[in-house]
Every structure is written in C-alpha cells, then in structure tokens.
Amino acid sequence: MKIARPRTRAGVAVAVTLPLIAGAFALGIPAHADGAQHGRHVLKTTKPQWATTKADRGSTTGSAKVTARVYLAGRDAAGLADYARSVSEPGSASYHKYLSARQARARYGPTKAQKSAVTAWLKSAGMKVTGTDEHYVSVTGDTAATEKAFATKLHDYSKDGKTYRAPQTAASVPSSLHGAVLTVVGLDNAPKLAEHDEELPPPGPVFRNSGPFSSYHGSKTATGLPKAYGKHVPYAVKGYTGKQLRAAYGAAGSGLTGKGVTVAITDAYASPSIAEDASEYARRNGDKAYRKGQLSQVLPDDYNHTKDCDAAGWYGEETLDVEAVHALAPAADITYVGGASCQDADLLDSLSKIVDNRLADVVSNSWGDVEENETPDVAAAYDHVFQLGAIEGIGFYFSSGDDGDNVASTGTKQVDTPANSPWVTAVGGTSLAVGKGDRYTFETGWGTDQAPLSKNGKSWKGLPGPFTSGAGGGTSKTYDQPFYQRGVVPDALAKANGPTRQRVLPDIAAVADPNTGFLVGQTQQQTDGSEKYSEYRIGGTSLAAPVVAGVQALAQQAGHGKPIGFANPAIYARFGTKAYHDVTDHPRGPTTDLAVARVDFANGADDSEGLKTTLRTLGKDSSLKAVRGYDDVTGVGSPTARYLKSFKRH
C-alpha cells in the first residue's frame, strides 16, 4: 500500500495515495474487459503496473503473510455509475434526485447472500476472515492460501530499488461470484509496514515567517532590494485572512455564510489542539466565533504507522483545512473525519464513514500521490465510494498537487491521484493578489521560480531562477475524457498522450501559492521545547481545496440548501461565463512578469542562523501554462460573485 502525505507546510509539500477505474459507463471511460476462464471471473484491476516481467525476482516465500480486503461490488455496480452521472448532470431527468444513505445501501449495497457467498469462498480456500462491513471482507492467509483463493501466483518485484510482492497475473474469483466482487486490495505490499497501535506524537517544530511583509498585495514595496523586471516588487503578504479571501471569491456583501451546510475534511490522524487553535485563530483574525458543536471530529479507535506517516506533520494540514473552511464559510458545520494512518485502507475507511452515514455535503481532501504509483485495485475501491457519494449528493474535492507536472520531483510528466478520478473535483492553484480595500487585483497560475539575492545585495542571482513548486495538472494516462470535459478542454491537452482524449486536471482553482498564501494559527513546539500557539503563512493546493470547499458551501446555501453533489458537470456548464476569473500567467500583459520579494529565517524558526532573501517570480508552473480559456493549471478558472449568484437560479 502507498502512503498518503499532506500537501503543505511552510512553502509547499508533497503528496501520496492512489485510485483508478470504475464508473466506465457513466463517464466515457473504457471498462476493463471482464474475463472468465476455467470457471473463474478475472478481476482486471488487480495487477499493479510496476509488476513487470523485467522486474520479476521470482516466487514469494510460502510463509509470507498476506492481509487483504475483498471489496464488494454490491447489487448493481453498472447501475450505480449510471445513476451517479444522471443525478449529477444538469438537464437530466434525475438531476439532484439524491438518495439517502439508507436508500443507497438498499439499491446498490451488497446483499447478505453476496456477503455470505464471498465469506464462504474465502474460508474454503484457507483464508481467515478477520472482519466485514458494507464495503469489504478483510482476510489474512499465507502465500499458498492466497494463491489458491485468487488463482494467481505471488512473485517478488523490484521497484524503486526495493522488493515488493505482487500477483504475477490478474487475480480472479469463482464465476459464481461474478457481480459480487469489485476488486481485491492488498495482494501487493508496496511498501511493507508493520501494523501496531500507537500513540499520537506531540506537535512538530515551530515554523515562522520572518518578514518584512505586505498586509495586502503591494502595501509594502521592497525599495531596499534590487529591481526585478524593471521595477521594485512588493514584499510577500503576511498571509491573507478570511475577510480578504471572501472578497476575492465573491462572498463579501453576499450575506452567504454556509449556514445549513456541512463540510467534511479528511486527513490522517488528528491534531490534539485543533479546537483551541481554531477558536484562537478566529478570535485573532476577525472570523466568526465557533458556536457549540459547529466543529466536530469522527476519529478511529486506534492509530498506526505514526512514524512512517509523520503523524505530527498532519496536524498542520487539519488545522489549515479547518481554519480555511471556516474563514470562507463561517456558519457551515465542519466535521473532521480522521484516518488511522496515511495508508489507503485507512483513508478509504474515512471516506466510507462519510458516505455510509451521510456526514457531509462537501468533502475537502488535501492529500494524494503521483499517478505512476496508483494501483488499479485501490483506485476501483476509491471510485466506488465517490459514486456512492454522488448519488447521495456528496461532492469530493481533491488538491491537484504541488509539484507542477511532477517532472522535477519524479522525472516523469504526470498528474496526481485521487485528483485524477473523473468522479472528484480536482482543485488547482493560483497566485492571488488582493489589494487595498480587499479588492481583487489579479491571479496568475501558481508556479514559482526562485532567485536568491546576490552576495553583494545588488542583483537577483540567475533571475528568474529554478522552478520550486506549482499547482499540479496535466493529462491523465489512466482515465479517458469524462463527458463534462467534452467541448471545453482543448484537444492539445486532452490528446497530449496520444490519439485518445483523456481526463485533464484540474477542474477549478483557488489561491495556493505560499507566497500569496493564507495565515494559519497552530500550536507548535517552540525552540525552547514548550508548546504554544503561533501563526504563519501557508500555501499549496492543500489551501486551494478547502477554499473551494468553503465556496461550495456558500453556493449550496445560495441554492436554498439543495446539495450540489458531484459538482463537475455544473462547474463545466458555467464555463465561459462571468462565473469565473479567467486566470492567466500574465494578467498585466504577455511580456510582463510579476514577482514578490520574500525574507525567511534560514532555520525556519528565528534569526539565530541568519536570513534568506529571495525573489519569487509568479506564473511559472513547470511545463504547465495558465492561458485564456481552460488550462492545465487553473481549469475553468477561480470562482467569482457571479458563480455564487448562479446557484440561486438552479
């Protein structure tokens, strides 16, 4: 299983998780051909792409223990995908005719007979059944029992300099179970991590921004530093507040607060100080105080992999997500659903809790992985949950990544997952300028080149400097083009990988650049070892996702509380209107580059080791470009006041 990581921190961060193919009929994705041989039904999504003949290192030892989940397809997997599309597509006879969680289970959930049949088959093959729920049957067994159950050989394969187990051929189940089993997860073990309960660690080391700062874009010009692009540039903002972001995205003066809407946030683990931090942040920065019960948490009984997943590193992610949603939608309820770890299984469990109990209308997710690491089995399980959410009127929003086209970080041009799923809204990133009087000034696509101040302080060394970070985007190599992107996404992007049109990311965008980022408040471990609340500027598409989630809460309220659900069809239906800022990399003209100056503590905490002064050039997202119309950095653009108003008519 892959490890998911939060996407943010001081500047940017990385990501990791996994998904792939389900709902082929509804979204124009070619379904994997079902196979049946020797009385078996082949599960085509169960062999990882990295398990190649060249990487094969021979049979897995017979004593190796396998822990797996057999995911259940339910009563009508194809019908689920079809209804998920029709209930989400404007103009459809079923548009917004959502089902309750109970109705969804009754129509599309597994039957008792299916569960019993799957359980009996696994036991007869020598596997030990360790648990069942509405989505899967969990099992353990040695290599021989696993190979018998799934009619495949387990081999060891070389991957990234290490050796992992994976099925040599696609797994299969008895033909009598055709239609009952969606996929099996856990036959591969990349990476292998031991399971054990753990206590959560204390908060991580403090991070602070140095300054000088601008309070709004352009409020403080760096006149004492060299010019760039023909003029003195402004210092980076200290960090935008909710008041500034609400103004930028059309909420100021609207009267919309997100009242009556619930936003869920999923991350791994849970910050032990989140309630106090969120309350203190609201008090200090002019946000509405939380009412009793407005912020709640749904947490697992135990945690695991706290060291492997850097549990304390997720505390800042939860804090950012909660504070950003509240800043945009101050009356919305927020439900944090924490995962027991950053692994697929635990994150899937968090998402399933939301769907099974209809815990929210909007779900913000700021984690993921690169597409080359996704495994088809887990992807199918994710998409199944997203489809169930769609028919219940739940929309899932995923950050698109913080490494641009991922070439600098992986050597391969690729998109991120689960943002690549056509069943979620992929949220890209911008660099945002909010001017005096909270006036929206401009946005560029988020992509940063960094040049240090020369030793003599008279120039910027190697201007504009190398690429450091930027919004994820591009063309999926996994999914074909979904119906809602047809006629909007240019063929130059859709066909970037060949003659077949494929899914392109992102769908929509909001502020993400950490140089034009959000002020966040969190309890951190200070340099003297004490734990104390402090504030710092933060960015990444981990910021963009909860900002858009907050905007969607406002839009749902504007639409008289009717859930928006899976939003992509509605988002693309508004393309080309004044519902969006059409974000480009050069809003001041094709030859005008924009930049800010930034001063940081060299050690990230204080001036004991000196300061670093750099120039950050905006709108330089690796090979990705924000241009007029749809683009692979900002999608259809960022929301405006017209976007919120448009929901009053629907």
Image (cartoon, helix red, strand yellow):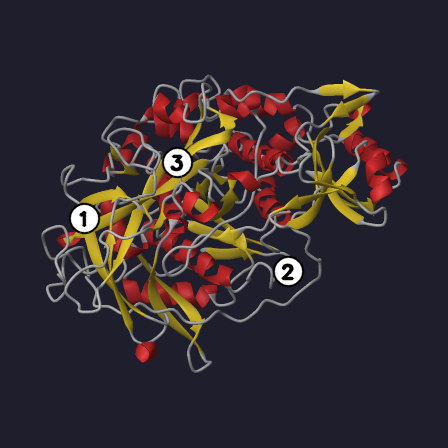
Residue annotated with mark 1:
594
Between 101 and 233, the one nearer to me in the picture: 233
Sequence-wise, the earlier of marks 3 and 2 is: 2
Q: In which quarter of the image is the C terminus?
A: top left
Q: How crowded is mark 3: few (under 14 residues within 10 Å), some or many (20 or more)?
A: many
Q: What's the distance in space between the residues labelled 1 and 3, CA to CA?
A: 23 Å
Q: Which residue corresponds to the image point at 46% horizontal and 17% vertical from the top-left?
A: 93
**SS under mark 2:** loop
CB under 8 Å between callouts 1 and 3?
A: no
Q: Which residue is drawn at 59% across and 28% down?
A: 22
Q: In the figure, 69 relative to 459: above or below?
A: above
Disc 2 target residue: 303
Left/right of residue 475 with respect to residue 612 in the rendered view: right
User: Closer to the camera, 213 or 156?
Assistant: 156
Q: Which amino acid, by three-letter code, is at mark 2?
A: Tyr
Furthest-bottom residue in this view: 528
Q: Which residue is drawn at 75% across and 31% down?
A: 171
Instruction: Name the amino acid type tagged 1.
Output: Leu
The x and y percentages for residue 269 are 56, 59
Q: Residue at x 30, y 27 (%)?
A: 575
Q: Name the residue under label 3.
A: 506
Percent of width and height locating residue 610: 30, 75
Instruction: Please state which of the two labelled residues, at mark 1 or mark 3, is closer to the viewer.
Output: 1
Local crowd size for mark 2, using a 10 Å CA cut-off: few (<14), some (14–19), many (≥20): many
Q: Is residue 211 above or below residue 397?
A: below
Label 1 Cα neighbours within 10 Å, binned few <14 / some 14-19 / many ≥20: some
Q: Is residue 4 visible?
A: yes
First in residue order: circle 2 vs circle 1:
2
